[in-house]
Image: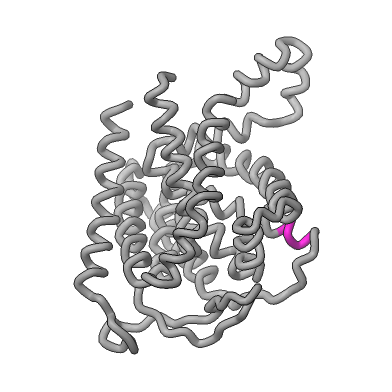
Amino acid sequence: MSQTNYLSLFFKGMAMGAADVVPGVSGGTIAFISGIYEELLQSISSINFGLFNILKAKGIKGVWQAINGRFLLTLGSGILVSLLSLAKIITWLLTNKPILVWSFFFGLIIASTLLISKQIVKFSASRWLMLLVGIVIAYYIANMPQINTEMSTFYLFLSGAIAICAMILPGISGAFILVLMGSYGFILNAVHSLDFKTITTVGLGAITGLLLFSKGLSWTFNKYKDLTLALLSGFLIGSLTKVWPWKKTIEEVIINNKTFAVAQKNIFPNDFSGDAKVFLAITAAIFGFLIIYILESWTRKKT
């Protein structure tokens, strides 16, 4: 892989990290539409106990090649840089420009859904059924009530393990899973303040969940690709309810002196209590839609 391709991969990682910060948007969606999703799954699922045999036979270099180390390191570096540098910016935007941010991601997800579903060779009854199942699951998750519990070390580890599974699924937001588990604000604040104990605990949970979940997902892609794509398309469609720009807050919670909405309902722009910013919202949605198509077109030309 050339330096240009590694730089491109790094920026794709940054885009994944930025998406993962936002409750309602999945880094897996970015990985899928940027053309690296299957390679990512295969690379992660190659990390197993068989690496000890490779280490004995071929050394560290053999292990590095077996897990596609350069790919994972470059992509992971981009994700990490994004999480550390963009977390505050995206949090500020969600607080001060929520309609425009959600509109942008609404357009992004619609475009992603079209691109993913386009890869299904032929829609059959089973594929339509999986699409419906995906919609129902994502809609149910998006409307679940938040859990309130103590942020123990084990709970933070569990939060990381569960959230990472969602993060690599297009349409299921890992950040939103953290919101539902009540740990989003705590973890985001830990990233802001560089609380390495919390970051390490969540990170270890994420690594554990990622290694376990990626193997199953990689297997379904290899054996039942069209059914998996139909399910993922359903996830994306179902997640649109979470990123609808105009909402009315029903319940809030204060975590570390910051207010988070834990219960909201979608409303029409004309029912919005403030400035609905309809024209700007439509513009932002179109912009998000076009970015996905431009990125997909550029990726297709590179392959």
Q: Is residue 133 visible?
A: no
* Residue under the point 76% across and 53% down: 197
**In the depicted view, which residue is nearer to us: 127 or 283?**
283
The span shown in magenta is 154-158
Q: Is residue 198 magenta?
A: no
Residue 135 image-quadrant placement: bottom left
197 relative to 169 in the view: left or right: right
Above or below residue 125? Residue 96 is below
Q: Quadrant of the C terminus?
A: top left
Q: Quadrant of the N terminus?
A: top left
Q: How many marks?
A: 0
Residue 302: x and y, percent? 30, 27
**In the depicted view, which residue is nearer to us: 124 or 83?**
83
**In the depicted view, which residue is nearer to us: 68 or 122?**
68
Residue 108: x and y, percent? 33, 56
Above or below residue 116? Residue 297 is above
Residue 238: x and y, percent? 43, 65
- Extreme-front residue of the structure: 193
Q: How is the image coloured?
A: one colour
**In the depicted view, which residue is nearer to us: 229 or 91?**
91
Residue 259 image-quadrant placement: bottom right
Above or below residue 235? Residue 70 is above
Q: Is residue 230 visible?
A: yes
Provide the major secondary structure of the magenta segment: helix
* Residue under the point 27% across and 35% down: 298
